[in-house]
Amino acid sequence: MKNIYPKTNQFQHDSVHNTPSPHMGPQTTHAAAPSNYQTIKTIFHALGFGISGFILLTMFAIFISNPTEAATEIPQVSINLDDVDSGQLLLRSENVISLALLLTTDVKVTVAGTVSRTTVSQRFINTGATWAEGVYAFPVGENAAVDSLKMRIGDRFIEGQIKEKKAAKIAYETAKSEGKKASLIEQRKPNLFTNTIANIGPGEIVTVQIEFQSKISPRDGFWEMRIPLVSAPQFMPQPILQHVNFGSKGFANTASNETLDQKRDIKIPVHDELINPVDISIDLKPGFTLGSLESQFHPVNIQEVSQGQYKIGLNGPVSSDRDFVLRWTANNKDVETSLFKETAQGVDHLLLTITPPFEVNTTQTPPREIIFVQDISGSMSGEPLRQSKLGLEMALQRLKPTDKFNLVFFDDNYFSYAVDPVSATAAEKAKAIKLVRSMQSRGGTQMYPAISYALSNFSYKTTAMKQLIFLTDGAVSSENSLFSLISNSLGTARLFTIGIGSAPNSYFMSRAAEIGRGSHLHIGKTSEISEKMNKLFLKIENPAVTDLKLTLPEGFDAEYYPSPLPDLYVGDPVSISIRGQNPTGVATLNGKIGSQDWTVKVPLEQAAETVGIAKVWARDKIANLERSLIAQSGNDQSQENVDIELLRTALSYGMVSRLSSLVALDVTPSRPTTSRLIQSKLPTAIPHGWDKSQFEFKRQDILSPKLQKIQPPTARLYKASLSSDSTTYNLPQTAMNWRNKAFLALLSLLLSTALLWISRKPAYA
Amino acid sequence: MHRVALRTLAYTVMAAGLILLARASEVPLKALAGQFLLRDVWKQTLTSGNELKPWASADFKVTGELTIPRLGLSQIVLDRASGEAMSWSIGAVSSDPNTTNAIILAGHRDTHMKFMAKLRIGDLVNFQASDASIKTYKIIKSMVLETPQLNVEDSFAKASQIILTTCWPFNGTQQGPERYILIGQQV
């Protein structure tokens, strides 16, 4: 009964009032409306409201559904090879990645002048309960080359041998499929060396020893050597377990940290217990009289073994909780020269390092004429253009009134700020900055006409330093014609190239900069563009030495690199690697500081013997060959010849390169197979020539009682599938979400209709 | 007075709505019209053998054609996956023949790569390169990446594969890091 009353009430209510209402029902009862026009109008309004109501409801539903979707997303921690900033062993078993527990680290470094040779020995244990595949990663720093690898996994011994890359891969794949332990080093990123290890058993101890060579360059008068130690996993009863979704192969994926909740249960190590103990010893031959020598974060013992040779060591092992940094300076900040020698394969190798005068008379810095060539093509749109505009603006602001500048923008066409370079007065700078800010991106990438114009835009009468800054993100199409353009019309100018993003133009850009006798800067992350541009501009404000030439004494026939020699900037030393038979006599290095001549005479007999110099030469030669490949693009025959020469150099000097890699094969001393049971109880035999202090140990001596519970494997598992060499592609954003926009547009149209309807003239006015 | 203010507001909202509508419809219109324009250039490419820019101000070239016989559709492929190129058609993420032989393509989930939702394992996909050679691939695997980084083993890439990528989820309303991947093996 109760139901009926409201219904009738409603009906009565509606029929009493004749005013239109948003309800559908009553309106149809308006049969007696004054005219047909009114009826139609009412129906339209009603329909409009019906539709808008429906759309509003749908939209409401969509907006409700979105937040719930977002809420189910679990915040995830990512584990990535790019994040590795100290020596680590990443283990993968099924879909779980864990960091192997680091037991000890031992680092030995020999520094001679600008070259350092580092031996890192690290011991890990697989604390997981299953067989795992591992990737050993060590950030060796830029300009470093790993050339030796020794490993012990359980009771197997593995040693690296340099092979041609194709052969190396096959050897690794074969060893892996046969279930043998194998490992492969290849260049992945310039500063991170990774090494894949197949078949690591539960409880097995992995000892890895790598040796690498790197260059040490002084910065602001300081020489610095850093050993990355900081982020090793801490001593915990359980390793950090991370669940990973292998969306693709490799490690570039997300993971969620499982131990977060257990953190409270983990005992904090006792005060005197070492966390991942590390021992470091350094043999330092700076090649000049030391001004100061200090360890930044660790107390050390410094001992002068002989004149110009120092031994630096820790007072026993320390916890691996911060990077080790050693810094030294020269007593005399002016011209410093060092010369080292190594005889390898019956030939002498020399490394000559010269630091130009540190104190350049800044009041005499010559004025500059600088032309910026900026890419504004369609592909630069968004962040790249915004950031490079910022960088350009900062560069303009730094110019002195005595400097001259011009700006050239290009897409398919080009245009310049001024006809000829103008003086960098405050007014001109402000005007130019305004123009820079107004730039929009569009069109294609035609760089030849722009570069050609810019090169001929310098006023050749002036003695000013001429610098051309070329910024692009585009792929280069006509490399050879550009190379010849640059070398023909460069004159006394210097070309600096800035490459942005992942466009495959790095080789062209660096080679162009080399022909242009400047330098190349590659910026991968768009967020770093303006910052890195600014650094480059700061540096090129003060070139120290230009027009460098090396003259070797007569009768000493030698090959030297880099060739041609680069310009030097304040604080940069030049290192020249020379290879030849019996160096005697005096070599002369000529250059110009501003307009003054600068000469250094080097008696070659006075070289100090040091290991590693031959490898430096080989590395410099390989780098030079790689660059010359670009100049010969288009000529397959000469490119093949360069490749043959490169591979020959890499193999004879034992270098990892584009064509050669270090493949590690089983070198376990063989035992009689008949008495395996008895043999396994004998102490493990160490291969000849291996460092016993690192590779010979008893399990119980190096493991804490807690870890000894983990049993080493008794059976071998033959399964491995970890990727060894991969390329990462950044996939673009591929959603335009035009539907959202269209939806919003329709909604606002409806809203406006509704507003119009509300504000209509009363029907019966 | 009140009514006048309301009307002004109404017209303002309407104008905003129209502008927004025009901007939103640019995407599907470009996508539709683009194919007609690009198809002409593609025919020229096939006869001449040179990759061409579709129009003078474009910062990309036409490099191939992707055909899916089962769905009866085809899309022109451009030589780069920049935002500009992808507003017109599918773009190639990797067009550098030195790093890999795998073809990696990317397109918008709501325009050119919408068809990926309908592709199934076992479907055949044809790719015609600018030298007119046609390769047929069979879709063998699908997956979703949580981050927009695709790690491809070099040895894997050398084995002649095609990788189609687009944003995930298909009916998503926001831009996100997830990507949907289909891998095709040459048959």
Image (cartoon, coloured by chain):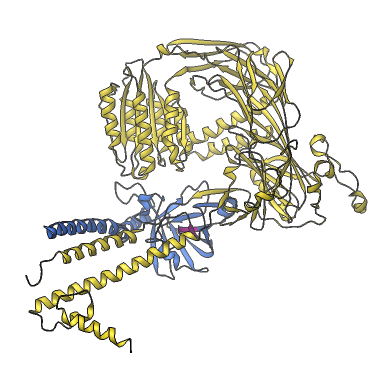
Chain colours: A yellow, B blue
Pick the residue in front: A226 or A610.
A226
Figure quadrant of residue A66: bottom left
Residue A189's place in the image compared with A672, above or below, is above
Left or right placement of residue A687 versus residue A237 in this view:
right
Q: Is residue B164 magenta?
A: yes
Q: Magenta region, mostly helix, strand or loop?
A: loop
Q: Nearer the viewer, residue A132 or B135?
A: A132
Q: Indicate the position of residue A246 as horizontal and vertical percent values.
A: 59, 56
Image location (x, y in percent) of residue A374: 35, 34
Q: Is residue A569 left or right of residue A168?
A: left
Q: Is residue A680 above or below residue A752?
A: above
- Residue A252 makes an appearance in the image: no
Please state which of residues A273 and A264 is positioned toward the viewer in this rendering: A264
Which residue is at 17% across, 67% downward? A757
The residue under the point 60% across, 51% down is: A250
Q: State the quadrant of the C terminus of chain A.
A: bottom left
Q: What is the residue that sits farthest to the bottom in this orientation?
A: A1
In the visual, does A201 lie left or right of A297?
Answer: right
Q: Magenta span covers which residues?
A: B163-180
Residue A268 showing in the rendered view: yes
Between A315 and A560, which is closer to the camera in this rendering?
Answer: A315
Q: Position of residue A583 (x, y in %)?
A: 66, 16
